[in-house]
Image (spheres, rainbow, N blue to C red):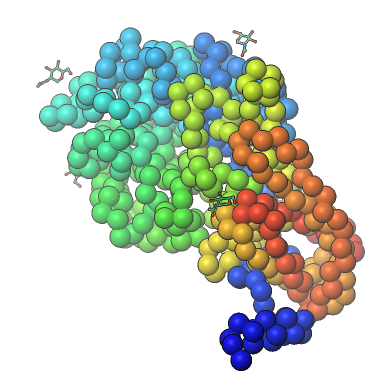
Amino acid sequence: MKLDTFFSIILPSLASLGVVDAASGYATVDLSKTTGTAQFKASGFIYGWPDNGTSASTAIASNLVTDIKFNSNRAGGAQISAPGWAKKGYDGYIGRFNSALSNYRTTRKYGGDFLLLVHDLWGADGGNVGKFPGDNGNWSEMEAFLTQLCKDIKANNMLDGLVLDLWNEPDLTMFWAKSWDQFLGYSVRSYKIFKQNLPGTLISGPSMAHSANKNDKNWQAWAQAVSSNNTIPDIYSWHQIGAWEREPDSTMPDLNSLQKTYSLPSRPIDINEYASKDEQNPACTAFYIAQLERNNMRGLRSNWGGGAALHDSMANLVFRASGGTGGYVPNGEWWLYKYYAGMTGEKLATTGAKDRRFDVFATREEGVVKLIAGTRSVKAQYEVRISGLTALGLGKSGKVSVKTLRFDWSGDRGQVGGPVEVGVKDVAYENDEMTILVDPMANSTAYAYEFSGNKKGT
Ligand SMILES: *[C@@H]1O[C@H](CO)[C@@H](O)[C@H](O)[C@H]1NC(C)=O
Ligand SMILES: *[C@@H]1O[C@H](CO)[C@@H](O)[C@H](O)[C@H]1NC(C)=O
Ligand SMILES: *[C@@H]1O[C@H](CO)[C@@H](O)[C@H](O)[C@H]1NC(C)=O
Ligand SMILES: *[C@@H]1O[C@H](CO)[C@@H](O)[C@H](O)[C@H]1NC(C)=O
């Protein structure tokens, strides 16, 4: 018998007995373990506000912002006609500062925190910047720049909700074309200048493109420098962009290891850019949300727009209808964030699939459980194994009525509407554990599942 014939006969019969598992792996949810109040920590983005002089922008309808519980933004006037401080001093800088001020005011209108990109005000947003802080061991230009910036921040009443993000992706030549030692000198010096002038304002760093890695020479040298000079940022920050940079479940233990080796205290963490362009779809966004939430990280979506498009569209969550002339409308990913914004109550303990290609985020409020699940953009079946049904007042075995919602995607400018109600189905379970099979329609499809226990309350 040919092998494929053998399998085609034997597999369906084994599968019907539950012996062969078609799933590539499983994620878990423990209904009996809560991990803190849901805070929508992944509902931020970088750039994405239309500029409006120095005023808040009203171009995007406010419900598109509040419905997703937007809570953080990161900008610094990049990619506009003003080139920044390095090229033209104050005259090159002020246009960028004003753009950032407008974005700050839009962010504050919605109660969000604003992460100011100092490197963009300098003008180091790619291209030929010319000079960097500390060239030839001379820091006076940088001191003049930072002194001006601190003065303008104070004069414009820009301190509430502000975070100073010292430099973006200094580990890429595109953003820092000088030696790593010179960057470390900048980190230590800029930290001291900011703390001297704006003592109550939080500082984040190192915002590296390469995620925390205990074997990375740049991370090691940075940890050593900030620790020994007592210039440790208030928030540790880095980027999680693409599978090649792994994911928070893998990078968090590396940060812990660096902290231990270099005597760095525990601090809040900002993943102040997450997801590559082709990871921005409902499935992979659910994956990132699950990873960020589990590791208690604040997350800001990457923004892959350039020029004017960078300063628009809430980092590709909304777009102008009628080919760019109409009002703003949401795309498929926006609807996933809107659902996530409704996941109130307590977070539940979860684990991701072992292959790091599937994950789940879950909350529980008054006996109502909500989950979102998605793959890292692969079209493959996975299971969600849910334990602790007795914690909801249900029996050790029985049936639960599970409602399924599907999140479709047809690109940044695809208006797919709200989640599709797939239906409500009774799922039988035993030994206090229920399995939901997730069989995605496409590599971009995310799902939500809802069910409730017998008794209300926690
Ligand atoms: C721009 O700001 C002004 C206030 O300075 C405000 O009246 C106007 O609505 C804003 N326009 C847009 C499109 O954001
Ligand atoms: C340092 O740079 C400033 C301006 O960028 C310049 O005026 C000054 O002469 C430089 N100092 C030295 C010692 O070269
Ligand atoms: C940081 O500390 C090291 C010694 O631990 C010292 O050599 C270096 O000059 C300090 N850097 C700055 C910018 O002060
Ligand atoms: C997902 O599917 C689309 C359409 O079938 C394809 O173009 C894309 O390359 C796939 N993405 C990944 C990461 O495999």
Q: For the N terminus, give its image quadrant.
A: bottom right
Residue furthest front in the image? 1
Residue 2 image point, x, y percent: 59, 87
Residue 282 image point, x, y percent: 64, 47
Residue 295 image point, x, y percent: 54, 55
Foreground pick, 242 / 9? 9
Residue furthest right in the image? 454
Foreground pick, 4 / 432? 4
Residue at image position (87%, 75%) is 398
- Residue 363 in view here: no
How many marks on residues? 0
Q: For the C terminus, give its image quadrant.
A: bottom right
Quarter of the view holding residue 4: bottom right
Q: Is residue 430 left or right of residue 266?
A: right
Residue 425 image point, x, y percent: 87, 63
Residue at image position (56%, 24%) is 312
- Residue 413 in view here: yes
Foreground pick, 22 / 80? 22
